[in-house]
Amino acid sequence: MTSADKKKEGRVLLPSNIVPIRYDLKLTPDLEAFTFAGECRIKLSTAADLGPDHREIIMHAKELCFASASYVLTDGDAGTSSVTADEIRVNTKSTTVTFCFPTALPANSTIYLTVKYTGFLNNQMAGFYRSSYTDIHGESKIMASTQFESLDARRAFPCWDEPARKAVFGVTLVVPRGLDAFSNMPESGCKTLEGGKLKELSFLDSPIMPTYLVAFVVGEFDHIQAQTEHGVLIKVYTPPGKSDAGKYALDCATKALDHFNDFFGVPYPLPKLDMVAIPEFAAGAMENWGLVTYREVDLLIDPLKASNSQKQRVCTVVTHELAHQWFGNLVTMAWWDDLWLNEGFASWAENWASDQIYPDMKMWDQFTTGHLSAALRLDALKSSHPIQVPIHHAEEVEEVFDAISYCKGGSVVRMIRAVIGMKAFQTGLGTYMKRHAYGNTETFDLWKAWEESSDMPIQEMMASWTEQMGFPLVRVVGETWKENEVTLELDQLWFLADGSKLAEEEAKKKWTIPILTCTQEGTQDDMVFMREKTAAVTIPLGSKDGWVKLNAGQEVPMRVLPTPTMISRLGEGIKSKLLPPCDRAGLL
């Protein structure tokens, strides 16, 4: 059994003998009754080994009321007569619906399934939900928007709600004539319906993508817009009267999208990018492809009155979500156990892009006391978990949206960049994006791309950082100082915040640690991989009183215990400020 097969063991997935190719969604929300009517037409492919008695189609669905389901066969000799389900079974525990048909489904065929249903515009900030706000005239208003990650697309339409079940989406929204509505793709048509009170908006087909990235918003909005140097139109949608508050975020987005275009070497694949402020929003933001939704405070600020920390927050949230347009949207994890790959990389990228746009923010200096410190605090507890966590039931993913996935994930990505260098790092990412565009990947696909670009053992190094919890304490247990060099003897052990004694097996844990060093001459080019429990490194010194610091730049998520002599000598580096700020912070 391959390592990929082992990862898949125990996963609770829908049957793979029927898979979606395309969804055509038509939704009619009622903002007064807090309901919506839905019609979902899905193009499906049935497997060649579909049994002769197979009469069921199982899909994810939650809090939906079904009226009918039927399919037509589009190839073969059966013509186009419709077959209607004679039983619809809803399983609230597994959040699935089973459509049972009177005759067997055709194998190795393409069929079109049409499902008519109704749902609720809930107030739980999940699925297709409603938000209330007060407009500029003091009146209470209702809008509707979506939040589908991780498992709530099934609240809006029946679907294969799994990240690997990618499909094309065509969206049509029927809304009151006075409201705005938009989706992932630009509008392709608009017509006023009979009676003049409603209008039907249709949108261009999406790229192939997972259900959790589908989005639509209905309400009253103002907007401002700008175009990137690469020709992508970006709009910031705000509540009426607040459009000026979106200018800072718009500026961040236009610059960031251009930086990511150039960095990945793959153009942003959609014709537009909308960013929408939602009055009631559970997370900070959501990276829906082409329609990013935000909590208001993470998108809208007064640039003249906002503090530096508020500006930085908006900038990093915007850049985080835009990084996902490639890393997560264009290339998507195959299953939720690689969530860290999405969030860890975006956590690194938000700092990289913010540093490119506003170098005065000194994001990498802040990374040491921000992301890295948060990761080490949580990961120093015995209650922590590995970056890569086996997830069998999709619902378990909610438990790993934490500082390990985001902050430690971002820290190990930063470590890889330090080890292989920016050129190989960027080249490997470009290869990864091109090779897997519009597809799904496992973590080892990214390691492979970086191994190819750097000719270094990334898989070997990273297994110890992503597949086991915790991080090492590297102790200097011996030192030999000479006039022009110092030799340090090192050992490593699992660091625990409570200082509890390690059991025999726990004491055997080890990491493949890149030993990066700096002296008064700067960061040393030579790097040693500490693969065993002990190692020795020799570092050249510029003078007999020279100093050395391990973990230069705080690039590796670990702690270091230097000797009293090392600390004493470092005093000169601190006093002269030849020791960079992030290294000085790392000593605390």
Image: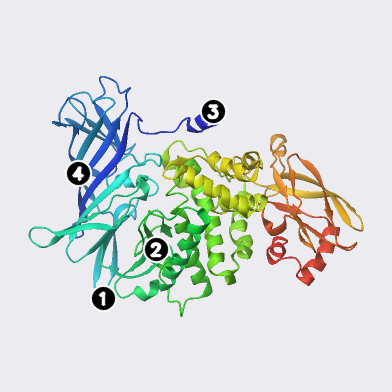
Circles 2 and 3: CB distance less than 8 Å? no
Task: Name above or below for residue 30 compared with residue 302.
Answer: above
The residue that disc 1 covers is 138
* Amino acid residing under circle 2: Gly
The residue that disc 4 covers is 117
Between marks 4 and 3 in the image, the one whose residue lies nearer the viewer: 3
How far apart marks 3 and 1 lie (CA) works out to: 62 Å
How far apart marks 2 and 3 lie (CA) works out to: 44 Å
* Amino acid residing under circle 3: Thr
The residue that disc 3 covers is 2
How far apart marks 4 and 3 lie (CA) works out to: 42 Å
Total residue callouts: 4
Position of 79 with respect to 215 (left or right) is left
Q: Which residue sits furthest bottom?
A: 304
Q: Earlier in the sequence, mark 2 or mark 1?
A: 1
* Amino acid residing under circle 4: Tyr
Q: Quadrant of residue 234?
A: bottom left
Q: Earlier in the sequence, mark 4 or mark 3?
A: 3
Task: Name above or below for residue 378 compared with residue 66.
Answer: below
Q: Count neighbours of disc 2 (C-alpha within 10 A) and say few if under 14, some if 14 to 19, many if 20 or more.
A: few
The residue that disc 2 covers is 231
How far apart marks 1 and 4 lie (CA) works out to: 35 Å
Task: Name above or below for residue 304 compared with residue 223.
Answer: below
Position of 255 with respect to 202 (left or right) is right
Q: Which residue sits furthest left?
A: 195
> x%, y% of residue 7?
51, 33
Residue at the spot x=58%, y=46% of the render? 384
Position of 46 with respect to 382 (left or right) is left
Between marks 3 and 1 in the image, the one whose residue lies nearer the viewer: 3
